[in-house]
Image (cartoon, rainbow, N blue to C red):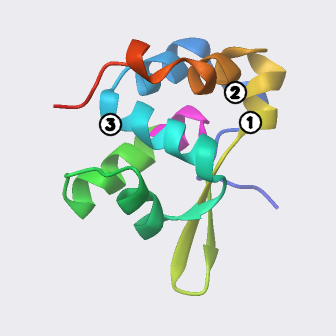
Amino acid sequence: MKDDRHPATDDLRLVKVLAALADPVRLTMVRTLGVRGESPCVELHQAARLTISQPTFSHHQRVLREAGILRERVKGAQRIISLRDEDLDACFPGLLGAVLDTPEDLVQKID
């Protein structure tokens, strides 16, 4: 079955992935998912300690999904978010690991 909401692994592009990760909010979302693993949207929003509105959170989530970094699936009334770590590693070996393993003091803080 074709999935129009998520780009195919062959369609992932480094420029789009890096642009999505360049935003501090999106970087925080990805790093939080890296620690927590798969998570419902509401729990991810809380765990990342983001002080942004739900529509803004959804926008950032969409950017990450369209870049091929996140996968969404629906479970009942919840949207479950996970990292596409295998797909990213297949295209850009080590990139996600570097993003997730970078010490917190080297990551720009969200004001």
Q: Nearer the viewer, residue 107 or 81?
A: 107
Q: Earlier in the sequence, mark 1 or mark 2?
A: 2
Mark 3 and mark 1: Cα distance apart in space: 19 Å
Report whether residue 51 is seen: yes
Q: Position of residue 16 (x, y in %)?
A: 50, 21
Give the magenta-colored segment's residue range.
64-69
| Magenta segment main secondary structure | helix
Vertical comparison of 62 with 45: above or below: above
Residue corresponding to mark 2: 11
Residue corresponding to mark 3: 25
Q: Earlier in the sequence, mark 3 or mark 1?
A: 3
Vertical comparison of 92 with 45: above or below: above
Name which residue lies at 62% across and 41% down.
34
Helix or strand or loop: what does disc 3 sit on?
Answer: helix
Residue corresponding to mark 1: 85
Q: Position of residue 36 (x, y in %)?
A: 61, 52
Classed neighbour count for the residue bearing mark 3: other residues with Cα under 10 Å, few (<14), some (14–19), many (≥20): many
Residue 28's image quarter?
top left
Q: Position of residue 14 (x, y in %)?
A: 60, 14
Report whether residue 70 is seen: no
Q: Label 2 near label 1: C-beta < 8 Å?
A: no
Helix or strand or loop: what does disc 1 sit on?
Answer: helix
Vertical comparison of 105 with 69: above or below: above
Name which residue lies at 43% across and 48% down.
62
Name which residue lies at 76% across and 56% down.
2
